[in-house]
Image (spheres, rainbow, N blue to C red):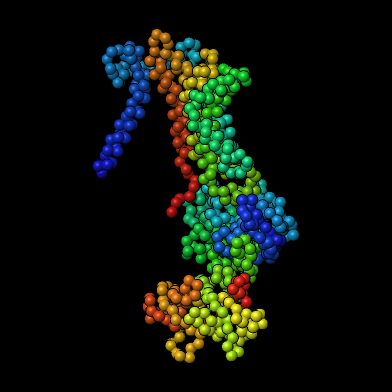
Amino acid sequence: MRKSNKWVHILLGIASFVSVFPILWLLLTSFKPVSEIYSDTFRILPKAFTIENYVDVFTRSGGVFWTWFLNSVIISILTTVIGLILSTTAAYAISRFRFRGRKGITMSFLLTQMFPGILLIVPLYIMIDQLGLLNTYVGVVFAYLAITVPFCVMVLKNFFDAIPIEIEEAARMDGCSQLGIFWRMVLPLSLPGLAITAFYSFLTTWNEFIIAVTFLKSHDMYTLPVGLHHFVNQFSTQYHLMAAAAMIITVPTLLLFFFAQRLVSNRYFYKKG
Amino acid sequence: MAKVVLEHIYKQYPSDNKPTIQDFHLEIHDKEFLVIVGPSGCGKSTTLRMIAGLEEISDGTVSIDDRTMNHVEPKDRNIAMVFQNHALYPHMTVYENIAFGLKMKKMDEKEIDQRVRHAAQMLDMESYLDQRPKTLSGGQHQRVALGRAMVREPELFLLDEPLSNLDATLRVHMRTEIRKLHQRLGTTTIYVTHDQTEAMTMGDRVVVMKDGVIQQVAIPNELYHHPANLFVARFMGSPTMNVLDGILSEEDGLLFFIAEGARWKIPAEKASSLREKGYIGKSIILGFRPEALQDEPESPSRPNTFKAEIEMMEHTGSEMTLYLKGVGRGGMTARVKSPSEYRLGSQLTLSVKMDQVYIFDKETEEAVV
């Protein structure tokens, strides 16, 4: 091994440890009994292994955790699906059609990415309140779309730009309509881009806290990150429940990641050379 | 099969000052293999795309079998096109690629299968039907693209530089295959290329274009031997035609071409034609092909000679191309038999076969004789 390689490996090892250790600790903590979590002795591995924390998360307060889980699933899926429909069509139009205001629209998508998302909360809150959509799925999905769609459009536009125009022209000659070209050629050829943007939208929505805590008022409308916050109260933090709930929250994103990863490898384009 | 008529076609892009295509007027006969050739940016691909319906026509009409096509959708023109980069659908197998156009026509599955397999057999691609394009070579891509065009049994084939992405050997092979295919199918074909060898070897007729304007339409032999202007003369043929600027001068009833280091006698029949057209005493451009130069043993009586220095040599087997310094616009090229006595930098006296020279008007660059 060359000297420079050795240092790269050491640095990568440290970086991986820093990233993975907190998650590993959380996972191990979620299987520790309450007494062990709050004891003064520092232990990494659980002395006694238990799934009691998980059972407790699901059963406390009449199973409200299930409701939050369901809310998160509905909101994240709606944002991802609607976001993909909007961003694929918008990105395709920007990529392929020449129309008045095209550059301005592209710039405005870029511009929204230059400001922190929190700046949007106040205007979005006012708009959603005026529409009477506070504390509803639609309201919060609307807010999430405002954050995710511009990014997805920019990513997808680059994917669409990379598809040779001749493929679309060949399809046109073969009898495809414009919509047919979009559906049969452009979307299948952009699967990696679709996977990346879908994963980004889902992850952003699934983990989002500030918009959810601001726009969702009642207990039964909370999403998981807001619900998780409820394990912290004025006088104590229920670390055992937080650890178990945090691990449960990670499962869907992990599943989605493994699914999306398979689509991300660009399988179709020709070998070079 | 189809007859294609292009009547006074113009293409003007809003961003450009002058039209990309100007007054393109041509009739392409039924079953003809027509080649459009010209340098990059001359408008040959634009012309093809207008026939395909992928590009709007600014003025003029395109008709196929007397049916005006200007506003007909590409899919309804019964045309198949092969693109320069082949434009195969990367996410589909070879079978699906070839069958796609037929599926779009909602053709019966059995009929589709029959046509695809027949095309694959003709193109020797039967064993690749289940493979995706990325696993195929350049030549196989080309065949799939041809197969995709063939199965639709179109009235007209449009081929846009289909061989330019292939290596030299494969290009020569595919050239023959495309010609054979045309002979077998008899479909009217318009073939666009920037390669004059392809144009000369493939076309029944060749259209030479420059700056969006047709320079000449003729059979390959005529283009080579009777170019309409200096551009065609220099574009067709490799190495390119030698060109010299000079004047025509009459001495004792004989006509001479006078340039620096040259005093060459114009043959009688060319001379009388030049006299008739009033070129005596005028500046002209004289052109002759590399094979019109002769290197014969030194003799004092040898007429129409000039001296030059060998700058570079290219062996092409039985022949040899000599690049000469010191004469003509940017030097000259001579094609001679291939003995080994030539040396780089050596002086050479060559004679010009004056019966094989071309004379062009200095101003218009049109061929005079």
Please state, as top left, top right, bottom left or bottom right, where the C terminus of chain B lies in the image.
Answer: bottom right
Relative to A12, A233 lies left or right: right
Between A148 and A224, the one nearer to me in the picture: A148
Quarter of the rendering containing residue A38: top left
Q: Residue at x 58, y 56 (%)?
A: B82
In front here: A73 or A141? A141
- Residue at (68%, 59%) from the top-left corner? B9
Number of marks in the rendered image: 0
Q: Position of residue B184 (x, y in %)?
A: 62, 65
Q: Residue at x 58, y 77 (%)?
A: B283
Q: Is B260 placed left or right of B76 in the picture?
A: left
Q: Position of residue B267 (x, y in %)?
A: 58, 85
Q: In the image, is B369 to the left or to the right of B294?
A: right
The image position of residue A55, as x and y in percent, is 42, 15
Q: Is residue A136 above or below residue B216?
A: above
B112 vs B99, nearest the viewer: B99
